[in-house]
Image: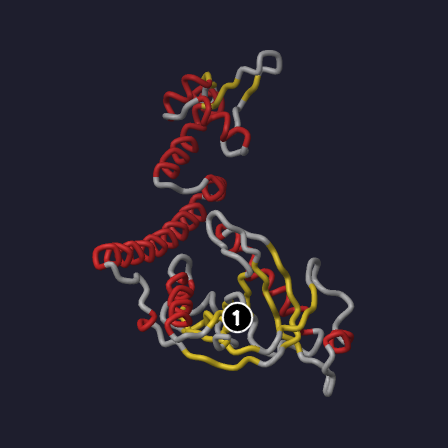
């Protein structure tokens, strides 16, 4: 018998029950992993539907079990187990580094909440942030608007901003900082909507929004539009790369909102994140300033 034959014999087929017991996976879990393509049976009887797995598949099954025990989502598990060994290890290391960073921020937020519950004071005192005011002129903006929950936002937002910046380049380039307007709450249960905006220049002496938009490129990204962002005054705070992450960024939104109420002003429009020109968010160090959290404000009527 050849080595290949002996190897094939050693890699025997196991019933779904035996395979599940050895992998510590229920039949229900095995069916789920089959539907998602994560762990597919080696053989399926076309008449009975009876499933069997190779003994060599136990390695992947045990890797899946261990990664799920530490809370890694199935989508990330799928990426890791199909990658070659070193690449899979790199993906796992990167995922866990991001998870530890997120846990660190959540730990800080929980600590602040505990302090607030014990003292009866606000968990985010406005005085902890350097809140300022400024006047913002009217701007013609290219926009995309989408209803998204927080888990979807991180992937869509930079892509939408990149699309609009590329479209603006064919109209002479950006004419100010790109920004995102939150027309509603964006969290685990609410989907906004959120609108990303890229300011572009109007022609010299052109004032009417319709005429101003006439010189824009005929082709915009799918779903994009053009509108005039009205001139306004806003209260804002500049935040660092570390503070930009969710849920850390909520402290900045809460602080600006509290400052508006305490200063006797009124919120005059939806809040927004204004991304600072020249700031490379992906490459920024945790303490680098990258974004302003801003609220349009008005004097009380």
Residue 299, position in %: x, y?
48, 77
Residue 249 lies, with reference to residue 4, above or below; the image says below
How many other residues sit within 10 Å of disc 1, few (<14), some (14-19) or many (≥20)?
some
Residue 20 is left or right of residue 44, and the answer is: left
Residue 121 is left or right of residue 25, and the answer is: left
Residue at the image point whose x is 36% and y is 54% from the top:
102
Quick one: which residue is furthest to the front in this view?
Answer: 301
The one of 298 and 270 positioned closer to us in this rendering: 298
Residue 12: quadrant of the picture:
top left
Residue 48, position in %: x, y?
58, 12
Residue 276, position in %: x, y?
50, 74
Residue 116: quadrant of the picture:
bottom left
The one of 199 and 95 positioned closer to us in this rendering: 199
Residue 95 at least partly seen? yes
The one of 142 and 122 positioned closer to us in this rendering: 122
Residue at the image point whose x is 62% and y is 15% from the top:
46
Q: Secondary structure at mark 1?
A: loop
Query: Which residue is identified by label 1?
Result: 268
Residue 249: quadrant of the picture:
bottom left
Residue 259, position in %: x, y?
38, 72
Residue 53 lies, with reference to residue 274, above or below; the image says above
The one of 22 and 138 positioned closer to us in this rendering: 138
């Amino acid at each position: 018998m050849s080595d290949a034959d002996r190897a094939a014999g050693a890699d025997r087929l196991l019933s779904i029950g035996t395979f599940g017991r050895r992998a510590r996976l229920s039949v229900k879990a095995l069916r789920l992993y089959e539907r998602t393509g994560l762990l597919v049976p080696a053989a399926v009887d076309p008449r009975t539907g009876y499933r069997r797995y190779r003994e060599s598949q136990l390695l992947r099954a045990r890797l899946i079990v261990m990664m799920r025990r530490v809370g890694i989502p199935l989508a990330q598990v799928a990426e890791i187990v199909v990658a070659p060994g070193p690449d899979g290890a790199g993906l796992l290391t990167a995922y866990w580094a991001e998870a530890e960073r997120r846990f660190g921020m959540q730990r800080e937020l929980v600590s602040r909440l505990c302090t607030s519950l014990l003292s009866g004071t606000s968990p985010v005192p406005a005085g902890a942030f350097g809140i300022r005011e400024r006047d913002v002129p009217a701007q013609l903006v290219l926009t995309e608007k989408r209803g998204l929950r927080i888990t979807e936002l991180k992937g869509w937002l930079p892509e939408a901003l990149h699309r609009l910046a590329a479209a603006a380049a064919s109209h002479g380039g950006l004419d100010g900082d790109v920004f995102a307007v939150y027309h509603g709450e964006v969290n685990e249960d609410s989907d906004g909507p959120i609108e990303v905006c890229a300011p572009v220049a109007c022609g010299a002496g052109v004032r009417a929004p319709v005429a101003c938009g006439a010189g824009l490129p005929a082709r915009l990204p799918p779903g994009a539009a053009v509108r005039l962002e009205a001139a306004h005054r806003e209260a804002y705070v500049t935040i660092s790369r570390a503070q930009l992450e969710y849920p850390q960024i909520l402290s900045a939104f809460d602080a600006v909102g509290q400052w508006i109420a305490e200063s006797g002003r009124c919120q005059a429009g939806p809040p927004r994140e204004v991304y600072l020109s020249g700031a490379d968010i992906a490459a920024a160090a945790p303490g680098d300033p990258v974004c302003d959290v801003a609220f349009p404000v008005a004097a009380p009527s």
